[in-house]
Image: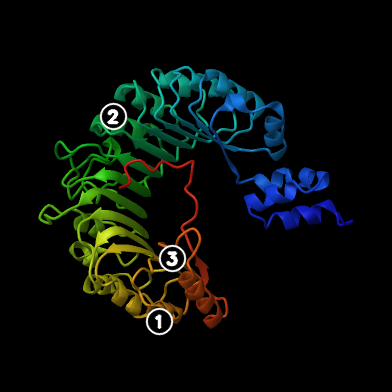
């Protein structure tokens, strides 16, 4: 090891991936000590399978790194107690498949905990378990067992600092009165994600509006992001979403493709969202049904598994002339023509995610004509890119003077997120 100052080495190590850091760490004792510096692991996520199998050396290493984000699989109360004892500064915790109903009650000493994800866990007394975690800003409840809707509503209502709430159950949606009661108690809530469950009827027009906004023309002004999972029309009426005119992001994951377009409410929703800047749609209606309704304010658009043809993509391009970020993973036969016309349809793109399957290299190289394109993600590239993909990447780098950064995948799955109900 040279005589460079330690802070210089730490700065250099900051450019390495986690895998490369671990490789460097094993080379000598000096690098082992420097690699464990807390500043190099600020965004690290540690996934634990069985907490009981880890020794004191493991916990000491996490302590040196000040690890703040933990994902635990199948923990019991003793496991959670050990976690709390060794890492009291945790800010993000994900519990998966915890069958011990008392485990959550041990989290009260985590005074820095801001993000809590509970997936497929036994929580018979959720209100008592969360009563000491009022500092939470992000809560995800996914398939919580043995907790009634009244219990869940009471537990959530006491978390007055929440800005993000994921409520993902596969039973019935939250009753209107219970939802309104929670919204009244959550003045800082900005992001709401709901798994809608099986369709059994039409929810009322004021489903998202509590008493403070029940008058016509008055909206639930706090929410800026709404996500609907496993959605089917006409679950929500055409007026239900338009009352949320402050939305800047709308995500709708449909349960499947929809053939009957007579019950389409999406077009009406979009026409009533004047501030929308980000739109994510998966499956559902053909693009032609709502292409003309997408607000011109949208700058980020994701269409996943949506049926479309070239003409509807052209119409969409006219609607969103200022589009900057596009994730286009369509179900169509015109993919080659769409790629060919991309520079004309979306001239201002900065990031683009598409598939290259069945698209000739010469056509794909035409994406270099997007003058502002900075990042291109090839969605269907294998983990070990083929010679064709590598050749394509090299040509784009050369012909754009490395202006376009080409990625061969969308990155690893976020272990701390909830992907239930998607597809």
Which of labels 2 and 3 is toward the front? 3
Could you say which quadrant of the image residue 419 lies in?
top left
- Decide: is 218 above or below 274: above
Is 135 or 392 nearer to us in this picture? 392
State the residue position of label 3: 378
Q: Earlier in the sequence, mark 2 or mark 3?
A: 2
Query: On the rendered structure, is 205 left or right of 415?
Result: left
Dot 1 crowding, Cα within 10 Å, few <14, some 14–19, many 20+: few
Q: Earlier in the sequence, mark 2 or mark 1?
A: 2
Residue 196 in view in this figure = yes
Element carrying mark 2: helix
Is 202 or 410 nearer to us in this picture? 410
Which of labels 2 and 1 is toward the front? 1
Dot 2 crowding, Cα within 10 Å, few <14, some 14–19, many 20+: some
> At which x and y percent is residue 118?
44, 31
> At which x and y percent is residue 205?
19, 43
Pointers 2 and 3 in contact (C-beta within 8 Å): no
Q: Earlier in the sequence, mark 3 or mark 1?
A: 1
State the residue position of label 1: 362
Residue at coordinates 31% horizontally, 22% vertically from top-left? Answer: 148
Pointers 3 and 1 in contact (C-beta within 8 Å): no
Q: Quadrant of the N terminus?
A: bottom right
- Decide: is 150 above or below 219: above
Element carrying mark 1: helix
Element carrying mark 3: strand
Query: On the rendered structure, is 90 left or right of 24?
Result: left
State the residue position of label 2: 178
Q: CA distance from mark 3 to mark 1?
A: 15 Å
Is 281 or 21 nearer to us in this picture? 21
């Amino acid at each position: 090891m040279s005589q460079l100052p330690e802070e210089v080495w730490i700065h250099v190590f900051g450019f390495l991936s986690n895998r490369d850091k671990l490789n460097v760490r094993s080379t000598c004792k000096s690098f082992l000590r420097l690699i464990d510096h807390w500043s190099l692991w600020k965004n690290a996520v540690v996934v634990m399978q069985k907490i009981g199998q880890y020794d004191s050396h493991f916990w000491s290493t996490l302590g040196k790194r000040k690890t703040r984000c933990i994902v635990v699989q199948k923990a019991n109360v003793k496991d959670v107690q050990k976690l709390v004892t060794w890492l009291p500064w945790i800010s993000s915790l994900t519990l998966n498949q915890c069958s011990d109903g008392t485990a959550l009650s041990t989290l009260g000493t985590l005074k820095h905990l801001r993000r809590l994800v509970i997936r497929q866990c036994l929580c018979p007394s959720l209100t008592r378990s969360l009563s000491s975690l009022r500092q939470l800003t992000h809560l995800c409840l996914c398939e919580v067992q043995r907790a009634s809707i009244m219990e869940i509503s009471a537990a959530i209502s006491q978390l007055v600092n929440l800005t993000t709430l994921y409520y993902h159950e596969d039973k019935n949606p939250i009753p209107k009165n219970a939802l309104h009661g929670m919204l009244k108690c959550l003045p800082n809530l900005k992001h709401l994600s709901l798994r809608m469950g099986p369709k059994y009827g039409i929810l009322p027009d004021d489903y998202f509006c509590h008493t403070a906004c029940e008058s016509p023309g008055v909206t639930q002004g706090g929410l800026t992001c709404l996500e609907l999972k496993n959605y089917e029309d006409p679950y929500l009426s055409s007026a239900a979403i338009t009352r949320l005119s402050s939305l800047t992001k709308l995500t709708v994951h449909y349960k499947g493709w929809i053939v009957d377009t007579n019950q389409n409410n999406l077009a009406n929703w979009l026409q009533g969202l004047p501030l929308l800047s980000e739109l994510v749609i998966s499956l559902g209606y053909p693009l032609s049904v709502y292409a003309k309704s997408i607000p011109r304010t949208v700058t980020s658009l994701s269409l996943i598994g949506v049926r479309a043809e070239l003409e509807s993509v052209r119409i969409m391009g006219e609607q969103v002339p200022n589009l900057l970020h596009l994730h286009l993973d369509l179900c169509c036969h015109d993919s080659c023509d769409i790629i060919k016309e991309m520079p004309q349809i979306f001239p201002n793109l900065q990031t683009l995610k598409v598939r290259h399957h069945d698209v000739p290299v010469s056509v794909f190289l035409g994406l270099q004509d997007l003058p502002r394109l900075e990042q291109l993600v090839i969605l269907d590239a294998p983990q070990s890119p083929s010679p064709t993909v590598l050749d394509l990447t090299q040509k784009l780098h050369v012909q754009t003077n490395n202006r376009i950064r080409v990625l061969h995948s969308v990155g690893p799955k976020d272990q701390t997120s909830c992907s239930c109900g998607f597809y």
